[in-house]
Amino acid sequence: MRDTPIVYVPTLTPALWEFLRGVYREHPPRILVEMESLELEEVTAGEPESGPDRYYTLVNEQETNGQTSEPDIALLDESEPGEVMLIDEHDLGSETVKRARILLIVLGVQPLSAHLWEHETTADRAIGVRPVFRDGGLANIEIVEGPTTDPALLEELIDHLRGARTPVSTLWGDVPGGGSQRVRTAVETEAWSLIRTGVAEPGAVEALTAALFGRDRGVLTGIRDRDPDAVWLETAELARATFCDGRFRPQHDEYPPEHAPFWETALVSPAPPEIAGGHRKRPGRALIVGSPHLATLWRDHIYETSGGKLNATTWELWDSGSATEEGLLEVKESGPYDLLLEVLVGPLDERQQILDLLLPQLAKDAQVWVHTLNLPATMIVQPVPQTFTAVGFSGLPPLAGTRTLEMIRPRNSSAADLNRAIGAAAALGYTPVEVSDEPGGVSARLLAVIVNTVAWTLHEGLFASPAEADTAAARTFGMNVGPLRLADEIGLDVFEAVMLGLQATLGGERYRFCPLLTLRIEAGELGRVTGKGFYVP
C-alpha cells in the first residue's frame, strides 16, 4: 500500500468520518469523495481549515482532479441500524468501487455476509470492519474476514492499520453485532435493568461502573455520549438479529433522549450517606471466613484501606466440609470479634452452618456482614440473633484502587443496623453506597455479565484466543485490566456463583452461565487460587 494511501468514499457519513479520523490521526490519506456527498459540509463542520483540503471531488469515472480513480481502499458505510445501503446508491462511483484494491465495509449489527451479495465482483477484496467508539474517539477496530477474502489482502490491511498505530482485533466468526458490541450491549442492558428495577440509583450505577472500569466515566456516560437513541436502535436490532437468544433481549423501556433531564442527575455521584452520631466506629478485631481467594483479597484490602489499623484474622474454607476443630480453635484464640465478614461461595445451608459455628466467637455488639454474590442477604442472615448487627455487602473487593463498598439492608433488619454498618465501613476507609438486596449488587453483577459474555464470544469462536477477546473487551470499556485477567485474580467460581444466583432468583436466559467457564471450573482452572487460569501460570 502507498505511503499516502488513497481512500475512496462514495458518501461521507458521520460514521465514516469518525472512522477515518480515528485511523489516520497523524498522517491523513488522500480521500476521494463523490461530488453528490451531501453530508460533506455537515460532517466536516467545525474542522480546522486544513481539514477539507484533504478531499478531492470525484468529477466522473475518469477524472478526479488529478488523483487516480484506482484507490487503495474503497470505504462503504453499512452501519446504520435497520438499513442496507444498496450499490445503486453509489452508481456514479460504482466502477471506482470495483477497481479498489481493498473494499472495506463498515458494519453495524448486521454481519458481513448480509452485504457480500451486493459486491459479488469484489467479494475476494471485501473485508468487514466494526469500529468501536469510546469517549468520542476510536477505541478499537474489529476485522471480519469474508469467506472469499484474499488472505494476502487481509494481512496487508491489518499491517496497514497497525502501522497507523490503530488498535485492531480479528474476528474469526461473522455474527450479528460482532464481539465488542455483544459484550457492551449485554452490560448496558443489565445496567439499565438495575436502574429500572430499583436495585440502585442511576448515580450509583454510574459511579460504581466507573470504579469497575478503573475510570472516571461509567456505563451511563458511554450511552449518553454515543446518543441514547442510536444505542437503543442498535440494542433493538441486535435483539431482532438474535431473536432466539435471550442474552440480548432489551429490558424495560428505551433510554431517555440525549437532552432529557434524566441525564443531568444520572451522571452525578450519590451523596455520602448520613451516619448517626457514634456509629462511625472502627472495629477492633475482624474475622473473615470464606473461600481462600476471597478471604485473602478482603484481608489485604481491609488492611490497606484502614491504613494498617485493622489486621483481620482469616479462616479459609472451601465449604462446610473443610471446617475442622483445629481451625475453629485457632479462630477462638484470636476472638472475640467485633466484625465478621462472611465470603463463602456455596449454598445457603452451608453458609448458615458456618455462621452458627462462629456466632459464639463474636462480641456482644458485633456486626455480621454477609456477601450477596449468589443469594440475597435476607435469606442468609436468618440464623443471626437480633442482638447482632446483620447486613449484606457486595462480596466483591473494590477494584482498580477504589474504596467504594456496596452495602445492603436485609428485609429482616433495621435501618439502624445498616447505619451502624455504614459507619463502620466509613471508619475503615470505605465509601459506602446502599444498593438493594439482589444477587451480585451492581459491581459484581455487571462484572460477571462482562466475564460471562466475553466467554460466550470465545465459546462461539469469534476470537482466536482468550487474550484477544480480553483485549477487545478492555478497549470497549476503557479498562486498564481485562475482565478475564480480573477473573483470574478473583476466581471463576465467584462469577459462577453470581450468574447462578441471578438465574435462580430472577430467571431468564440472559444469566445462562457459559459452558466454557463451567468446564474450566470443573478442571480446577479457577485462576490464581488454583495456579491455573486464563493467564495463570
Image (tube, helix red, strand yellow):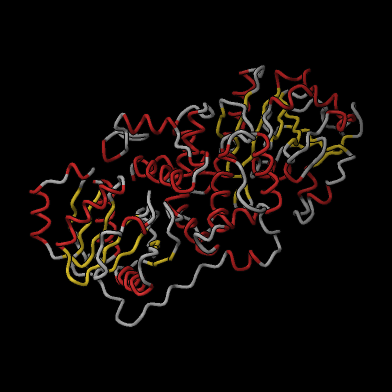
Could you tell me residue 79's position as x and y percent?
72, 38
Quadrant assignment, res 408: bottom left
Total labels: the figure holds: 0
Residue 397 seen? no
- Which one is nearer the viewer's eye here, 258 or 305? 258
Q: Is residue 166 left or right of residue 486?
A: right
Could you tell me residue 383's position as x and y percent?
26, 59
Query: Does 385 sit above or below residue 354?
Result: below
- Which one is nearer the viewer's eye here, 339 or 101? 339
Quadrant assignment, res 99: top right
Q: Is residue 116 left or right of residue 450?
A: right
Q: Pick out the residue farthest to the right.
A: 60
Image point 21% across, 65% down: which residue?
A: 310
Could you tell me residue 290's position as x and y percent?
24, 50
Quadrant assignment, res 180: top right
Query: Does 385 sit above or below residue 80?
Result: below
Could you tell me residue 339's position as x and y percent?
23, 65
Quadrant of image for the N terminus: top right
Quadrant of image for the C terminus: top left
- Which one is nearer the viewer's eye here, 417 or 469? 417
Residue 138 seen? yes
- Which one is nearer the viewer's eye here, 513 or 171? 513
Image point 65% across, 33% down: which residue?
A: 129
Image point 43% across, 30% down: which residue?
A: 515
